[in-house]
Amino acid sequence: MSDALRARVHAMLEAHSTATLATAGEGGPWAASVFYASDEALQLYFVTDTATRHGRNLQEGGAVAAAINADVADWHDIRGLQLEGTASIVPAAGRPSALQAYLRKFAGVQRLLDAPRGDSERLIGQRLARIPLWRLAPQRIRVLDNREGFGWKEELVL
């Protein structure tokens, strides 16, 4: 595994905050955008209620794909990540460190938990304290970067 490619993936994960998850279940395929944080092992952490369609799909099998990219106006500038792997609810023992990674990236969420401003923020903070925290463990990550040439890609297998 290339250290340079791994560093490039890590930098891209840190630079972005939203992933589009693709799941499939009884109702067919589904895509949902989630805020995520990542760690040194290139795992993503996100919150999702198990009652959502993608949450139910993840519980059924855990297989997931994700895309992370910036919006651009020219196809020459397309760059991003495609991931495939499995997602599972972070067990209680691992929740503090996973939550810490999430709160480092989204400092505003910590404020909702500690000092909500009004009933609406208090309700959001209460839900966030109870909602499952998920870990996406990628098995393959594809880096796309059209600045390198049209259709340029390189894969990292974990």
Image (cartoon, rainbow, N blue to C red):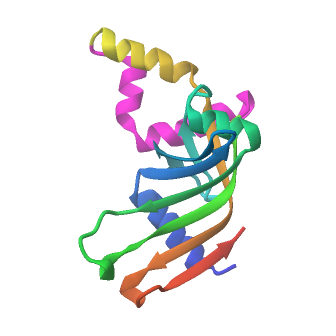
The magenta stretch is 91-117
Q: Nearer the viewer, residue 77 or 32?
A: 32
When the figure is inspected, residue 130 is found, relative to residue 54, above or below; the finding is above
What residue sits 62% from the left and 53% below the top? 43
Question: Residue 6 location, x and y as percent?
Answer: 59, 72
What residue sits 57% from the left and 81% below the top? 154
Q: Nearer the viewer, residue 134 or 11?
A: 134
On screen, residue 7 versus residue 156, left or right, reads left
Viewport quadrant of the N terminus:
bottom right
| Magenta stretch, overall SS | helix
On screen, residue 43 versus residue 125, left or right, reads right
Viewport quadrant of the C terminus:
bottom right
Question: Residue 4 location, x and y as percent?
Answer: 56, 80
Q: Is residue 124 magenta?
A: no
Tell which residue pokes out farthest to the top in this image.
119
Residue 63 visible in the shown view: yes
What residue sits 55% from the left and 66% below the top? 82
Quarter occupied by residue 98: top right
Question: Residue 138 location, x and y as percent?
Answer: 67, 59
Question: Residue 88 location, x and y as percent?
Answer: 71, 40
Residue 89 visible in the shown view: no
Quarter occupied by residue 7: bottom right
What residue sits 37% from the left and 13% below the top? 122
Q: Is residue 92 magenta?
A: yes
When the figure is inspected, residue 112 is found, relative to residue 95, above or below; the finding is above
When the figure is inspected, residue 144 is found, relative to residue 121, above or below; the finding is below
